[in-house]
Image: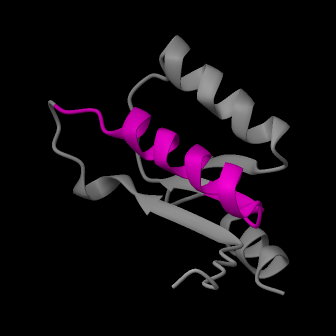
Amino acid sequence: MDKCKANLKQLLINTVVFVPHENPKKDFLIHVSNYQKVHNSLKLFGFVGELAEITSEESEIIDSLKNQGVRVEFYDQFNSNFEEDILEFSN
């Protein structure tokens, strides 16, 4: 497994499955940031669905991801750019 190379270009997390009283955004953001630091392949990361407010800690992680070249988006089911963004990063 030493020669394993991950090449994930886009990752979307569906927030509908989040437990209402828990807020796993920070955990997802940390894992995605750590992944990007190692693999440097991610171009688009997004949450799909309704989200609670972004905390200052989460905002710092999002800024770090952006500085690593990742486009971070928050989509709802009515966002017209969702399909366009997926197609743009699928090549």
Front-most of 33 and 24? 33
Q: Quadrant of residue 81?
A: bottom right
* Residue ID at (48%, 16%): 55
Relative to residue 86, is residue 19 depicted above or below?
Answer: above
Q: Percent x, y for residue 59?
A: 60, 22
Relative to residue 49, is residue 55 depicted above or below?
Answer: above
Task: Determine the residue located farthest toward the top in the rendered image.
Answer: 56
Q: Percent x, y for residue 64?
A: 72, 31
Front-most of 47 and 34? 34
Front-most of 53 and 56? 56
* Residue ID at (49%, 39%): 30
* Residue ID at (80%, 75%): 89
Is residue 39 inside the magenta stretch? Answer: yes
Magenta segment, which residues? 22-45
Tell me: 65 left or right of 51. right
- Number of dots carrying numbers: 0
* Residue ID at (85%, 49%): 69
The answer to whether residue 83 is seen in the rendering is yes
